Image (cartoon, rainbow, N blue to C red):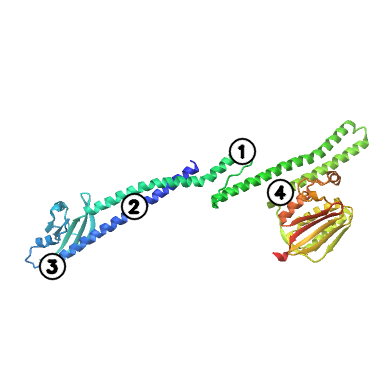
Amino acid sequence: MKLRNKINLFTSVLFIVLLILVNLSIYLSFSKMMLAGEVERTVAEAKQAINGINQVNSTVELQDILLAYVPVNGMMQIVDTEGKAGAGVAVPSQQTLWEIPVRYHQKEVQTVVEYNNIPHAFVSIPMISREGEVVELQVTENLGATAEMLNTLKLVLIIVTFITTIPVLISSRLLSNFITRPITSMIATMRDIKGSGQFKRIPLPKRSKDELYQMGETFNNMIELLEVNYEKQGQFISNASHELKTPLTVIESYASLLKRRGKDQPELFDESIQAIHSEAIRMKDLTQQLLLLARNEQHWLLESVGINLNEVVEEAVQSFKKAYNREVELKQETEVMINTDLQRFKQLFFILMDNARKYSEEKIVVKISKAKDQAVVAVIDHGIGIPARDLEKVFDRFYRVDKARSRKTGGFGLGLSLAQEIADAMGATIKLESVEGLGTTAKISLPLTNSH
């Protein structure tokens, strides 16, 4: 069953059931009040008759007294302790009431009884007879008029229930259409996307800001994100294939050369082995960087701790000097404390230091400072620099300013992309300032500890 039909069915059934329950409670409450009122009126008539019997002279026939107090639509009679009927009076239209069996109740009774499918108010009140014996005055009154009123009320409520069902069905259908329209639009859009392969969005009404609008807006945002990721994935695969193509071609060429002439020319054998080994290392480094870039920020597993930035950077600089035998000058304007992931910060710092090493031959300067509520680590080189037109593109994967020089330095165009991924995961920012031919300054900015 479709969702639209489910909503229509459940809404209609629920409303109709509630309507029936409300009408039923109205009928039962009204009938109970009316019947209780009739019984109370009959009780009042019976008590009035007892008072009349006690006040009238004993020479007056009891039958005549009862005739004066008998209900206009009922009967009165005296019943002794043995259950025998004594004096009694019934109006001409209710002579059939004499056929009701008589019994002595030994207590006051107030109730409604059914006789010939007609409700009757029955009251039995003990009293002292003229002879000094305990008897009961029993009054039975026909409630046919009240029953007709209740039947009319029942009929009216039934008709109202059926008439009200029509707008209920119509409104539930409109409600189900209103609720399912965005869902139907999503389904149609997803089918179009599946069939055409083109990302599409659903139209959104500007007048509404309810949950259905938010669902549609979220769907469009998701489609937009999927489209962007799809394009990036295609570009990434294309670039990765291009980058892997070169080392594979080199390996294949040298392997073929070894196969043909490697046994006869030892110097060619050494050259080929060296080239194959070098390209294999490049492929290994490339795949490792690709795996790191394929990570989502949620999978970085960061562990934020308080660190002394000066000590960490100084230690990293000393390690870099020994590893590459390069001159590095460390400038510290002030002592800086931050909260961050220590290992990821070192990884980010070494990426920027490695870029400075690759593209400059002169001294590298590392500067630690504060700017408002940010700690800033600047890596400054005096190398070839980056042209202004390429400055915004260097964070793109596989983008290289000078592919020939990058190939010589072993770069893949992935270092700054990886650095940007790490910085985003850490909550840091990276900014590049460069002048072609003069050098580049890369800045890492992190929130200070006292700013949290």
Instruction: Provide the secondary structure element on which disc 1 rests.
Output: helix
Residue count near mark 2 (Cα–Cα under 10 Å), binned few <14, some 14–19, many ≥20: some
**Structural distance between the alpha carbons of marks 2 and 1:** 53 Å
Of labels 3 and 1, the one closer to you: 1
Residue located beneath label 2 in the image: 24
* Image marks 3 and 2: residues in contact by CB distance under 8 Å: no
- Name the amino acid, label 1: Lys
Residue located beneath label 1 in the image: 194
Residue 433 in which image quadrant: bottom right
Of labels 2 and 1, the one closer to you: 1
Image mark for residue 176: none
Residue count near mark 4 (Cα–Cα under 10 Å), binned few <14, some 14–19, many ≥20: few
Image mark for residue 54: 3
Q: Residue at x 24, y 51 (%)?
A: 148
Q: Residue 334 placed where, x, y %?
A: 80, 66
Q: Earlier in the sequence, mark 3 or mark 2?
A: 2
Q: Residue 377 placed where, x, y %?
A: 79, 60
Judge by depth and name the residue closer to the eye, 165 or 389.
389
Depicted 334 relative to depicted 248: above or below? below
Q: Earlier in the sequence, mark 3 or mark 4?
A: 3
Judge by depth and name the residue closer to the eye, 1 or 113.
1
**Structural distance between the alpha carbons of marks 1 and 4:** 27 Å
Instruction: Provide the secondary structure element on which disc 4 rests.
Output: loop
- Name the amino acid, label 4: Arg
**Structural distance between the alpha carbons of marks 3 and 1:** 98 Å
**Structural distance between the alpha carbons of marks 3 and 4:** 105 Å
**Structural distance between the alpha carbons of marks 2 and 4:** 64 Å
**Structural distance between the alpha carbons of marks 3 and 2:** 45 Å
Residue located beneath label 4 in the image: 295
